[in-house]
Every structure is written in C-alpha cells, then in structure tokens.
Image: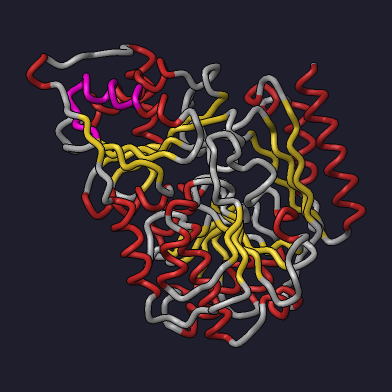
Amino acid sequence: MKKLFGTDGIRGVINEELTPELAMKLGNAIGRYYLGKYNRFIIAKDTRNSGDLLESAMAAGAASAGMNVEFAGVIPTPALAYITKRENTLGAVISASHNPAVYNGIKVLAKGMKISDEDEVEIENLIIDNPYHYTVFSGVGKIRQVDHYRDEYVDYIVGLYGSEKLPSEGIVVDGANGAISTVISMVYESLGIEADLRGIRPNGININDGCGSLFPEYLGNSLQQGQIGVLFDGDADRCLFVLPGSRLIDGDMLMALNSIKMVNQGRLKGNRVVATVMSNLGFEKYLTSRNLLLDRTKVGDKYVLERMLQTGGVLGGEQSGHIIFLDRSSTGDGLITSLETLNTLEELGETLEQFVDSFPVYPQLLKNVPVSDKKGVMEDRKLKDRLEELKKREDLRVVLRPSGTEPFVRVMVEGIESSQVETVCQELVELVEECSNG
C-alpha cells in the first residue's frame, strides 16, 4: 500500500502536507534510486507560486545524491513527457493539475510515462526508511536552466498538425491560468487558428480559480452560437470542450468522436478504445453500435496507458479529459486532444452539436464524500455487503472508490432511470458518512 503517492503522484496542501522537506527527500530518493540508469533529471512546473520552492528543494535533494538536474521552466506536463521520451531520461512535473493554488503536487516520469507503482513504492521506502544519503563531494550533481525544451515541444506539435485541416475561427480557449499559457498562442497561431484566448494570465495564485476544465460555465456562458470552447486544466494534460449554454463535452464524448476518424484513417488498431470503470454506459453502447470495443480499467490515466500498451490500443482516456492518442504522445496531452478533435470535426464535416445530439448518455451521478479514513471506510463490512447486493442489479452500475489525491470517497451510480440513480447514490453517500463517523 503506497503512503505518499496517489493515482497521480504526490499531492497536498503546500507547506502543510507537501513541504520543501518532503520535496528534498523525494529528490534525494529519486537520485539514489535512478542514479546510473538515467544521467539527467529534468524538472518542469506549472504556474503556481509554490513551484519555485519545490523545484529548488527537489533539485537540491537529487543533486546531493549525485544526479544532474535541469530546470525546464513552466511547460505542460505532456511537454515534459515528450522531452523525457525523446531524451530517454527521467523527469518530474511540479503541479496539482486541476486543484487550486493552495495545493501542489509532484509527478515522476521516465521516458515519457509516469513511473510504475512498483517504482513509487521503492522510492517511498527510501524516503521513509533512510530519508537522506549524500554522495561524496566529487560526485555531486550539477543544476542548470534549459530554455529550449518548450520550443522543441511547440515545434513537435506544429509539425504533427501543420498539414491537417483545422478551423480558422470560432474557437475560444480557457487556459485555466496554467501551463498551457506558455505554448497555446504559438501553436494555434502557427496552425492558422485565430482563437480567443482567455485564462492565460497566470499570477501564481489564480490557476484553476473559477476557470479551466472544472468550471465550464466560465467560458460556456459567454459563448455565442457557432463558437466552440476548449478547456484546459492547470498542467494541460487534459482537455474538454464546451458549447454555448455551458453544454459540456466530456472525455467519453471526445474519444467517441475521434474514434470515428481514426477508424476511417486506419489508426484505431484492434478496433478498441480503453477507458475506466467511470466511463458512461452510453459511451460503451455508442462504440458497440459501430463494432468497436470498450476496454475498461481501474481509475487513473496511468492504468489506461498500461492497458493500451498491453493490448496495442491507440486511443484511451478518462471522462475527465485525460485522453491518450498513443500514436501521437505517450501520455494524456490536452493540446493534442484539442487539435485532434478540431481536425476530426473538419474531416467529418459535422458540427459538435450534431455529434452530441446523437450521443447516448445514461443518467450518472458522481458524489465526493469527505472522510477522515479512506481505507477504514472501504473496509467497512456494512458498506461491502450493500455493494455486493447492488452488484446483482442489472439496471444499475455502481463504482465506489477512495480518491487517490484527495480525502474523499467517490461514489458513482449509473442506470436507466434517473430517479433510481439518485436514490441509490444518496443511500451510498449516507452509508459512507455513517462508516466514516462510526
């Protein structure tokens, strides 16, 4: 059982749960664990004001263990994934993704992918059992700033889509005041997309503050007929779309839409899409009607990627907008998702409204229940027994799981009748609260 790492790295309130001391211990453990296997450790960050603090602490820890460190500056998580894959090396992103600036986090990547659960456990053991180990003076690593990685990522994206059909107008972007703000204008302008860019003026504390992928109404309520909104999160590894009236286009819908084009282009190997247990049943029905398979995994884009690599899948992701086009990137990339989707609409000659109107969505409720002991709640016998009873019902699908990044138990109920979904969801919320207080 991991103690520090969740489903998306280490995350917590800055200077309370995630301190510079922990960042330095993590850097030192990373340096010790990977020294000899990788010769560089590249650190990137999003726009949070705590990024400099954690970056410096983690770099000091890694260099004291003998690892050379490079600062890539503020770039999207998928940009670092691209660089570490191309350079065959190690990296970390300092970001708390969609969370506000009071939080920060650290995700570790190797050769373009998040490190395995096994590696995370080994690193945790080093931190807990032997927090620091310093190399001799002659082996201390060097630390330097590298400014060209951002431009190399931009060049890669522009090279992918420079000859593809893309709309020239009608696009409005919400950058969440996050990392996408460092690359979005260069990429879109190079590709001839004259977008209205909003949420691209970060000040260190306004990241995800009432904007971005968790707040579609910020953009959606201002969109005019015929406009499309593109929503990013803080580190730009996810992307959602929104239509006028704040009609949200989630990851299920975006994967379904893009699967059509990928089939036409011969890109969808195995005629399968990989998603998680949280994906809507309507998504599964949509794919089945087109002779495509939905392959479900547990929650977390790293687990989606693992299944894709095992099965040869090319398209996979989550409702939240973490979408992996494996023939384009080794991780979820919000910028690639935006461009693939805009290109798909041009290729199919279909509006986003027309597609969404034809897409089946089953009633689904997701509730986050605050708890003090996630493990204790999940082991409660009364809760387990009730979940076993609900599994026997053919008209409902229930997923109950502890959050990997926050002090919540997440309750998801999906079914045919919305009234039944609401009733069962409320019952489980109350049961989780009872188990937590109990």
The image's colouring method is secondary structure
Q: Is residue 61 left or right of residue 172?
A: left
Chief secondary structure of the magenta portion: helix
Q: Quadrant of residue 380?
A: top right
Q: Quadrant of the C terminus?
A: top right
Residue for point 60% across, 70% down:
171
Residue 5 in the magenta stretch? The answer is no
Segment tinted magenta in the rendering: 56-69
Pinpoint residue 151: horizontal percent, then vertical percent. Answer: 31, 56
Q: Is residue 215 above or below residue 194?
A: above
Pinpoint residue 4: horizontal percent, then vertical percent. Answer: 47, 24
| Residue placed most toward the observer, 372 or 183 | 183
For residue 298, say whether it is visible: no
Q: Quadrant of residue 36?
A: top left
Q: Is residue 74 above or below residue 150?
A: above
Pinpoint residue 392: horizontal percent, then vertical percent. Answer: 77, 50
Furthest residue in direction bottom, as rendered: 349
| Residue placed most toward the observer, 92 or 196 | 196
| Residue placed most toward the observer, 213 or 372 | 213
Residue for point 46% across, 57% down:
333
